Amino acid sequence: MGTETKAEKKQIIFSGMQPTGVLTLGNYIGALKNWIHLQDNYHSLFCIVDLHSITLRQDPAVLRKRSRELLMQYIAAGLDPEKNIIFYQSHVPAHSELAWILNCYTYMGELNRMTQFKEKSEKNEANINAGLFTYPVLMAADILLYQADLVPVGDDQKQHLEITRDIAQRFNNIYGEVFTVPEPYIPKVGARIMSLQEPMKKMSKSDDNENAYIGILDEPNRIRNKVKRAVTDSLGVISYNDDQPGVKNLLNIYCSLRGETVESALSHFEGKGYGDLKKEVGEAIVDELTPLQDRFKELEKNKDYIDQIIKTNGEKANQLAQRTLQKVQRKVGFPSRI
Ligand code: ATP
Ligand code: LTN
């Protein structure tokens, strides 16, 4: 990327999200917010992983709409489409091509151990398709195609990063240094924001209960109400421990958004009740998300601008992806094009 010398060479970041619904506060704190912080110091690619999303059945019109809205949410949150490459996975055929090749360097036993596969198959017994099984291989292809050094994700993606590293190392052991072996980047606080209704469960955009999650485009009063209704406990003391998962979750949200440590938050809330905690958490969320929501509304009016981003960024991603793909094709022995 660019003409910089080796000493000043910026590292590469890759990450992505599925266009399976409006982003939640969990996606925002666990991933997107960190992308914003990291974007200045890295060459970054942020993908809308639409190929991954069809491992569960999607309505075509809804998928198209959500993909575009996800791209706009990335930009509204503060990702700069001039500095970063923001693009649709399906616009870069190399993802599927590399995934096929990597499938042949991945063992069934490894994929069988993936907890996400087990969870998703249990939830969707009627549609346990091969794509769901090989999902991590496509994810490895996403990352390795761009020689990413760092992958900022929430805690639930750790296992997928480990298999990506294993596949990369296995391939490099056979063919030489083809792939950069990527490192996960998982935030210390907020890597796993929990459901507001069942705080032992991860906050998820596909939860049937809308009160369980905050959508990043939820109206301010809706946000305040959802936080007010959040499940806590009957102890009535604000402290940070696993026996009070609801309170712990609210503190994690507060700390991530206000940039405070757990210690300083605990001394701030000393002597206060759950009502105060919920009120302040609600305000912290509203303060954080209001500017994002305003920018989103602006972007919605600007169709041509978004179209142009999709086109130019897709082209840039294609160019970069081709470099790695062609190298891989050569290494495995495919004939060169004349
Ligand atoms: P779904 O519930 O539909 O499976 P999801 O909400 O888990 O989706 P993904 O698109 O799978 O969303 O995840 C996008 C990014 O957000 C990933 O980096 C993931 O680790 C992170 N993430 C998802 N949920 C949370 C959460 N509750 N807390 C922190 N990070 C999260
Ligand atoms: N599986 C990820 C989404 C994803 C991803 C990636 C994240 C697909 N490809 C590459 C980081 C890097 C998830 O969050 N469910």
Image: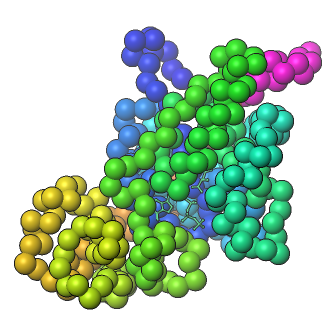
Compared to 167, does 109 lie above or below? below
Which residue lies at the image location 75% right of the left edge and 73% below the top edge? 124
Q: In which quarter of the view is residue 238 placed? A: bottom left
The percent position of residue 256, horizontal first and vertical second, equals: 29, 58
The percent position of residue 8, horizontal first and vertical second, equals: 39, 16
The quarter of the picture where the N terminus appears is top right
Foreground: 337 or 305?
Answer: 337
Foreground: 25 or 64?
Answer: 25
The quarter of the picture where the C terminus appears is top right
Give the side of residue 132 with respect to residue 30, left or right. right
Foreground: 188 or 97?
Answer: 188
Which residue lies at the image location 73% right of the left edge and 25% below the top edge? 171
- Residue numbers of the magenta segment: 322-338
Colour setting? rainbow
The percent position of residue 191, horizontal first and vertical second, equals: 41, 56
Give the side of residue 199 with respect to residue 261, left or right. right
Compared to 281, does 153 lie above or below? above
Which residue lies at the image location 84% right of the left edge and 36% below the top edge? 104
**Residue 328 included in the magenta stretch of the image:** yes
Foreground: 209 or 50?
Answer: 209
Say if residue 74 shows up in the picture.
Answer: yes
Compared to 207, does 142 lie above or below? above
The percent position of residue 216, horizontal first and vertical second, equals: 42, 69
**Residue 111 included in the magenta stretch of the image:** no
